[in-house]
Amino acid sequence: MNGKHQTEAALELLIIDRSLNAAEAKISALKNAHLAVHATSVASETALFVALDEKRHDIIICYANHDSLDLTETLAICRKARPDAPIIVIYSEQSPESLIEAMRQGARDTVHSDDTERLELVVKREFSDLQARRELERMKCKLSESETRCTTLIESSQDAIAYIHAGMHVHANPTYLEMFGYMDLEEIEGMPILDMISKEEHRRFKAFLRALGDEPKEMEVQCQTTGGNTFAATLEFSPATVDSEPCTQIIIRDQTNQKDLEEKLAQLSSQDAQTGLANRQHLMQEIDTQVKAARKGQHKGSLFFIVIDDFQELRRELGVAAGDKLLEHVASSLEELTQSRELLARFGDHTFTILSEIDPRRRRTDGGTDPHHH
C-alpha cells in the first residue's frame, strides 16, 4: 500500500467517550496530523449500537473510564459487529494489568488520554495496517477467481494436462485421462508419473525430474497407455500450485498427432480451397525452384496459362453458384490432362496454369495432350 493511497483515503472513525467535547478534541488532533477523518462520536450503549449498524468504521477509539459503559462489554460488542476494525483504548487511571486484559479481549493498543502525539501515530499505523489487510483480502479474492477460471480452462483444454508432486499424480484433466486410457481421476491419483513412461525411458526420465528447477523445461519421450501402446510425445514442465501446495504442471503433446496436423496445415497453405489445386503461392515457389535448376542446365520446362474466356460475363448470366461449379468442372478436366511431372495450379480467379518439366515439343509424343488444343 503506497503512501499516496493512505493520505487520499478517508478514515471512518468511531469514538466511544463519556464526553462528546473530549471526543471532538481527539478528532481535531487527528485532523491536525493531516488525516482525513470522518468521525462519529457516541456516549451511550444505544447510540453505539445505532452507529455500528449504520456505518462500516475503519478504527474504533474506546475510552476506558466511561461512566455507563463497561469496557469488557464494549469491546465484545465492537468485536462482534466490526471484527476487522482495530480498537484503540484510551485510559487515564487504569492499572497495567487491566490494560493487558483489554488487549487480550481484542484491543490493538492502549494510549494515555494525555498522549495526543502517540495517539496520532497509533491511529496512522492501524489505518495503514487495516488498508493492507483489506488489500490482501481483495488480492486473495482475485486469486481465487483466477484459479477458478484456470481450473475451468484446464478441464476443457484439448491439451493433456497433469499435476504431479514428488513424482505422483495429484490432478489431471479429461484429455490426459483419455490419452492414457483412464476413465476417472481417482484411477491415477497417487500413481507415479513413471507409469505413463515407456520402461526404456525410465532412467533418463528420472534424471530429468531430479534436475527440474523453477524454470519451465521440456523433453521428448516415449509414453505408454494403460493398454501398453506407446507413442512419441513432448512433455512440458513448469512450476505450479494445487490447493496452495507447490507441484509441477505437465502438458503432454502427442507428437504423432502434431506431425499429422503440421502436414495438414502445410497442405492447406499450398492448396486452393475451392478447387483443391495448388494455389498461386505454391506455384510461384515451384517456378522459382525450376528456374534455379534451369540456370544450372539441369533441365528445361514450360508454363501453360489457361484462361476461361468471358468468365465474368458467364458468372453474371448464370449466377455465382453456377460460376463456381464451372470453375470446379474446368479444374477437374484439367487434372485429367495433367501428367505426373506437371503441377496444375489455380493462378487467379479464372486462370489456371500447368508447370511442366516436359519439353512442350515432346509433350504430345509422350502420350500427353497439349492443353492448347482443348
Image: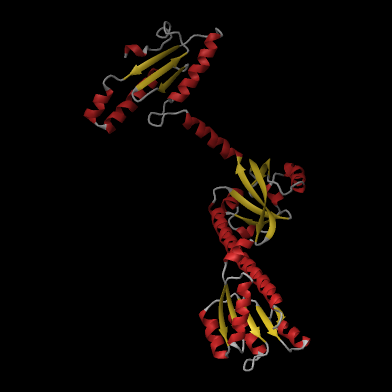
Give the quadrant of residue 364: top left
At 64% from the left and 94% from the top, the residue drawn is 67
Q: Tell me if I can see residue 188 in this picture.
A: no
Task: Indicate whether 114 appears above or below 373.
Answer: below
Q: Is residue 67 in sight in this rendering?
A: yes
Task: Relative to 114, say whether 197 is above or below.
Answer: above
Residue 236 vs 144, above or below: the answer is above
Classify the position of the C terminus by image quarter. top left
Q: Position of residue 300 (x, y in %)?
A: 49, 9
Residue extending farthest top: 361
Query: For residue 324, what is the image quadrant?
Result: top left
* The residue positioned farthest toward the bottom in the image shown: 68
Residue 28: percent from left, percent from top: 60, 77
- The residue nearer to you, when weighing 186 against 89, is 89
x and y percent of residue 89 in the render? 68, 82
Q: What residue is shown at x 35% (from left), y 25% (from top)?
A: 349
**Which of 302 and 214 lies nearest the eye of the viewer?**
214
Picture coordinates of residue 138, whole percent (x, y) = 58, 65
Colour mode? secondary structure
The total of numbered circles placed on residues is 0
Say which quarter of the image contains residue 255: top right
Near-viewer residue (245 or 7): 7
Q: Vertical placement of 288 versus 235: above or below?
A: above
Residue at the image point whose x is 71% and y is 82% from the top: 114
Seen in the image, is 78 located left or right of residue 207? Answer: left
